[in-house]
Amino acid sequence: MAFFNDITLGQYYPCNSFIHRLDPRTKLVCMTFLMTALLLSREPVLLCAFAIFSAVVVILSRIPVRFVLRNLRPFVWLFVITLFFHLFWTSGRILTQIPIIGVDVTHEGMQMGLTYSTRLGLLIILAAVLTLTTSPIEMTDALERLFAPLKRFHVPTHEIVMMLTLSLRFIPTLMEEAQRLKNAQISRGASFDGTLLQRIRSVIPLILPLFISAFRRADELALAMDSRCYIGGEGRTSFSRLKFGRSDYLVFVVSSLSLAACIWISLLPQQ
């Protein structure tokens, strides 16, 4: 049940760092560019370069490394499954054979499994850095400014952005609620240890009260917004005005060049 304690997605880590001071629009756009470039990267050299770049980003954000890497623990099973499927179901040069089940382990399967697992891990790290260095208010303002052109097509951008931001904001709240329900079940004699199947069965009793708590919090939030006469859409202003600086243009150029380089390399003929 360490899953509830390891996920930091949606949490904000206040700090005065280079990444924190960037415009939230810059962080959203550049992170999108970097994630797209990462998905296009297949060469081990590029993945190593992205790993070094991600480490530099974490250092510049001044967030404790353990706090960022905690997000990888809940997805270890996904890394293992990804490596497993590519390892045993990819044809190529045979490295070894497992005699019990008669399955061949290939060199290409090992390479593809490590590639996809590494890309997935780096994507999680970049997403964690984005949410940890951007407050919910900044995220809301940035998304609303980026989606502003859609207003010409009568798209309720403000309401959509607000729902996305509230969903992201309530992730750590729901994690805390799940941890509280787990502790309550343990105090009543429930056990969350044992085999994988037993752990899955022990989590099922937590789902219903967690859903009830989520709907209750949503209803309370709606009543609070209604009691304050909240009206979204046209006419609303922001407390802080977003403004690009020199560092924002520098980061934008670096991320754009990285994406262009990855697209160019991916279009080269495979040898």
Image (cartoon, helix red, strand yellow):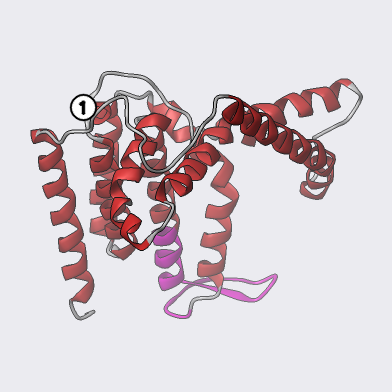
Residue at x 18% of width, y 76% of height: 268
| Residue 209 located left or right of residue 122 | right
Residue tagged 1: 18
Answer above or below: position of 157 versus 135. below
Residue at x 43% of width, y 48% of height: 121
Residue 248 drawn in magenta: no
Residue 145: x, y in percent? 29, 44
Residue at x 42% of width, y 43% of height: 233
Residue nearer the viewer, 68 or 209: 209
Q: Quadrant of residue 3?
A: top right
**Mark 1 residue type:** Phe
Q: Quadrant of residue 130?
A: top left
Answer above or below: position of 27 versus 60. below
> If the image is split into quadrants, where does the C terminus sit?
bottom left
| Residue 258 located left or right of residue 8 | left
Residue at x 23% of width, y 27% of height: 21
Residue 207: x, y in percent? 78, 42
Q: What is the number of callouts on the image?
A: 1
The furthest residue to the right: 189
Residue 56: x, y in percent? 24, 35
Residue 94 drawn in magenta: yes
**Do we see residue 25 in this rendering?**
yes
| Residue 102 located left or right of residue 146 | right
Q: Which residues are magenta?
A: 91-116
Residue nearer the viewer, 85 or 231: 231
